[in-house]
Image (tube, rainbow, N blue to C red):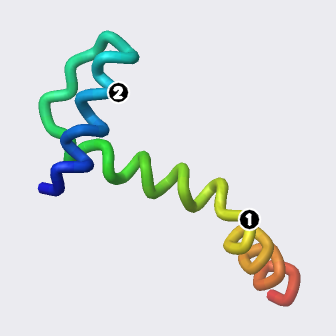
Amino acid sequence: MGTDLVAYAEVLARETGQQLSDPAKLIAPMVQRFIATDRGFVRARRSLSDKG
């Protein structure tokens, strides 16, 4: 597992006061958030649904 992901989990744990036992569990929510906030993807997806 990447050291950046471990560091990210440590910072997040400090900020939230919650211990995260497995930093890999952050990956899915991070990808979901990235997809939800990727404007280019949102536009392209909307364009595809408008055509279908």
Whole-percent x, y for residue 26 in the image: 31, 43
Find residue 2 and report its image quarter: bottom left
Whole-percent x, y for residue 24 in the image: 20, 48
SS at badge 2: helix
In the displayed structure image, the side of residue 34 where residue 20 appears, left or right: left
| Tag 1 residue | 39
| Tag 2 residue | 12
The residues tagged by marks 2 and 1 sit, at their Cα atoms, a distance apart of 25 Å
Mark 2, Cα crowd under 10 Å, few <14 / some 14-19 / many 20+, is some
Of residues 28 and 49, the one nearer the viewer is: 28
Amino acid type at circle 2 is: Leu
Amino acid type at circle 1 is: Arg
- Name the residue rendered at 13%, 29% in the picture: 21
- Name the residue rendered at 24%, 29% in the picture: 10
- Whether pointer 2 and pointer 1 mark residues with C-beta atoms closer than 8 Å, the reply is no
Find residue 48 and report its image quarter: bottom right
The N terminus, quarter of image: bottom left
In the displayed structure image, the side of residue 5 where residue 45 appears, left or right: right
- Name the residue rendered at 68%, 73% in the picture: 41
Mark 2 or 1, which is nearer the eye?
2
